[in-house]
Image: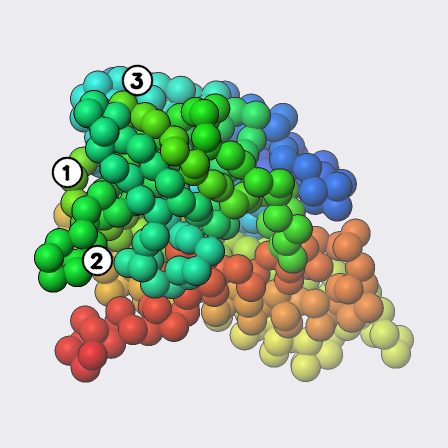
């Protein structure tokens, strides 16, 4: 029997986060967004709720939940604001998860308690200025000098990398080049404040204005050899598996944004009048909102399906790509339609739909572009 209803525990979490987003995030996020300020007070409140520790075991300070619980949380946060949602997603999926999945017991005991508590943030240093989608074209180098890694290079578009509570960045670096020219890529933890590790000023972005994003540089950065995460030479493969999980999370976030567009339009069309009628009485508006709801519903089912396979321990790479592609498209299409329904008001920053429109585009780019998702799906179908 197929049952898409959430069980009591999941539903309780969903409602709790929904209420938090409406009562704590919605009233203040607009001003923070316009000032491009990182929402430290909101992050602290989410930390108290245990949101940063949702999918991690209690032994490391986590909540003992699972990845689907994280996805539900991201969806509800993104219904109100995506900057807040991506801060949680990156902190959990990209900051803490590599250490949990591949780190030594000593690394887990050292770093995870603070990351799970949300009192510290971790970042994921994969993308480079000249790399983009070609993550295998890593140029950052790490050379072993006795019992120390010496790292040189740079990373770009790194979320949560420059906040006052950022404690580490796990970076991929070339640790050897084989005779056949193939690069050996490994993952190494670089604590914040390490000499030679510099965080550039924050980017001026189109959207996600309350999210922290920087370019990073490494100039003869020295860290202990034990900061290697997982096996030497397996860093690229490890990060690809992290990205598979992250795509399900980004799909959930995208569904939240798409649903937020529906929410805002339903309120607006019952109030706004044109030509003597509420605009919700016009069939053109009704059809547009119906299409928005269809996209949201379909995208939600896609990420539910991917998360279900993930939790069962089954291969889910194709389903993750499908979910990410469908959901990011839904977010982009819904934000465009919502802005159109709001008309001139949709172009004003005081209305949430303008924020949704600015935030939606990156969802078709980050953690694997739509083109990359199509490549992966085609590959799994045996046609590439």
What residue appears at the point 75 percent right and 41 percent down from the top-left corner? Answer: 35
Q: Nearer the viewer, residue 19 or 47?
A: 47
Q: Which mark is residue 347?
A: none
Q: CA distance from mark 3 to mark 2?
A: 31 Å
Q: CA distance from mark 2 to mark 1?
A: 23 Å
Residue 230 showing in the rendered view: yes
Q: CA distance from mark 3 to mark 1?
A: 19 Å
Residue to which mark 1 is pinned = 231
First-in-chain label (2 vs 1): 1
User: Which of the two discs, 3 and 1, sits closer to the camera?
Assistant: 1
Residue 44 placement, left or right of 244: right
What residue appears at the point 37 percent right and 40 percent down from the top-left corner? Answer: 152
Residue 155 placement, left or right of 103: right
Residue 116 placement, left or right of 235: right
Residue 301 sits in which quadrant? bottom left
Q: Residues within 10 Å of mark 3 (few under 14, many from 20)?
A: few
Secondary element type, mark 3? helix
Whole-percent x and y of residue 146?
19, 25
Secondary element type, mark 2? loop
**Marks 2,1: beta carbons within 8 A:** no
Task: Pick out the residue farthest to the right.
Answer: 276
In the displayed structure, 87 sits above or below 338; it is above
In the displayed structure, 259 sits above or below 164; it is below
Residue 97 showing in the rendered view: no
Residue to which mark 3 is pinned = 110
Residue to which mark 2 is pinned = 316
Secondary element type, mark 1? loop
């Amino acid at each position: 029997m197929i049952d898409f209803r959430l069980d009591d525990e999941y539903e309780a979490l969903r409602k709790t986060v929904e209420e938090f987003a409406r009562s704590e995030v919605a009233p203040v996020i607009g001003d923070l967004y316009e000032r491009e300020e990182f929402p430290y007070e909101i992050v602290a409140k989410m930390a108290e709720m245990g949101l940063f520790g949702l999918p991690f075991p209690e032994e490391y300070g986590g909540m003992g939940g699972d990845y689907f619980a994280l996805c539900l949380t991201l969806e509800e946060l993104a219904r109100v604001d995506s900057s807040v949602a991506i801060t949680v997603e990156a902190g959990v999926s990209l900051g803490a998860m590599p250490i949990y999945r591949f780190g030594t017991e000593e690394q887990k005991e050292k770093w995870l308690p603070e990351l799970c508590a949300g009192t510290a943030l971790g970042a994921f240093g994969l993308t480079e200025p000249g790399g983009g989608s070609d993550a295998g074209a890593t140029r950052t180098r790490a050379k072993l000098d006795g019992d120390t890694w010496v790292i040189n290079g740079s990373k770009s578009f790194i979320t949560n990398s420059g906040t006052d509570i950022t404690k580490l960045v796990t970076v991929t670096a070339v640790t050897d080049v084989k005779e056949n020219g193939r690069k050996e890529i490994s993952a190494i933890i670089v604590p914040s404040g390490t000499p030679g590790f510099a965080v550039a000023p924050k980017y001026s972005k189109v959207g996600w204005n309350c999210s922290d994003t920087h370019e990073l540089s490494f100039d003869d950065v020295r860290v202990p050899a034990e900061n290697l995460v997982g096996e030497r030479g397996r860093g690229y493969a490890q990060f690809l598996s992290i990205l598979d999980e992250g795509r399900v999370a980004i799909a959930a976030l995208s569904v939240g944004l798409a649903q937020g567009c529906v929410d805002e339009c339903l309120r607006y069309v019952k109030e706004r009048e044109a030509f003597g009628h509420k605009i919700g009485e016009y069939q053109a508006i009704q059809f547009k909102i119906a299409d928005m709801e269809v996209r949201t519903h379909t995208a939600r089912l896609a990420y539910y399906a991917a998360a279900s396979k993930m939790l069962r321990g089954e291969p889910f790479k194709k389903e993750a790509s499908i979910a990410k592609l469908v959901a990011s498209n839904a977010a982009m299409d819904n934000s465009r339609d919502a802005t159109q329904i709001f008309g001139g008001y949709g172009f004003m920053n005081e209305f949430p739909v303008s924020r949704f429109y600015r935030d939606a585009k990156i969802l078709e780019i980050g953690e694997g572009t739509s083109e990359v998702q199509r490549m992966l799906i085609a590959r799994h179908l045996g046609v590439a």
